[in-house]
Image (cartoon, grey):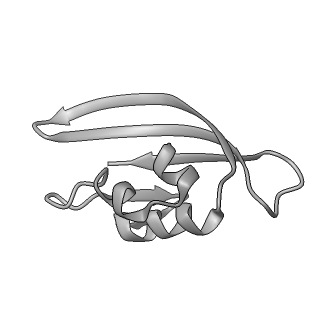
Amino acid sequence: MAAILTGDAATLKLLYSTNPMAQIRVKTIIHGGGADIDYWINMKVRNMKVEIIRGTAPGPEITHLILHIEMTTPSSQQTLSVTDDQD
């Protein structure tokens, strides 16, 4: 969370698996960790609350997370809500 709040892309990148490549699902579209990092850095989040909806480990070195995130940004008039599904 601190890496997002401070805009630290290098530290945020360390949280994403590269082998196997992280897969992030937004609605029905799956993309890699780089796009997800860009999303978070470009949001310029000022405040956030994260809740883990579900976390499983379906195999060795594989974690599947569903997160619910509430945040405020410089351009938001109200709290934004995001649900993120990551393999």
- Is 42 or 7 nearer to us in this picture? 7
Q: How many marks?
A: 0
**Residue 62 point in image, percent of width and height:** 19, 42
Left or right: where 77 falls relative to 87: right
Locate residue 24, reporting x and y percent.
40, 57
Q: Is residue 56 above or below residue 76?
A: above
Residue at the spot x=52%, y=53% of the render?
Answer: 4
State the residue lying farthest toward the right: 77
Query: Is residue 79 positioned above or below 24 on the image?
Result: above
Front residue of this view, candidates 19 and 76? 76
In the figure, is residue 57 to the left or right of 36?
left
What percent of the width, then of the height, locates residue 34? Answer: 37, 70
In-front residue for pair 53/17: 17
| Residue at figure coordinates x 65%, y 41% from the top left | 48
62 w.r.t. 36: above or below: above
Identify which residue is drawn at 83% across, 57% down.
Answer: 76
- Most extreme residue toward the left is 60
| Quadrant of residue 25 within the rendered picture | bottom left
Residue 82, image x and y in percent?
Answer: 63, 48
> Residue 2 vs residue 78: left or right?
left
Among the 4 quarters of the image, the one containing residue 54: top left
Left or right: 54, with 5 as reference point: left
Residue drawn at (59%, 69%) of the image = 42
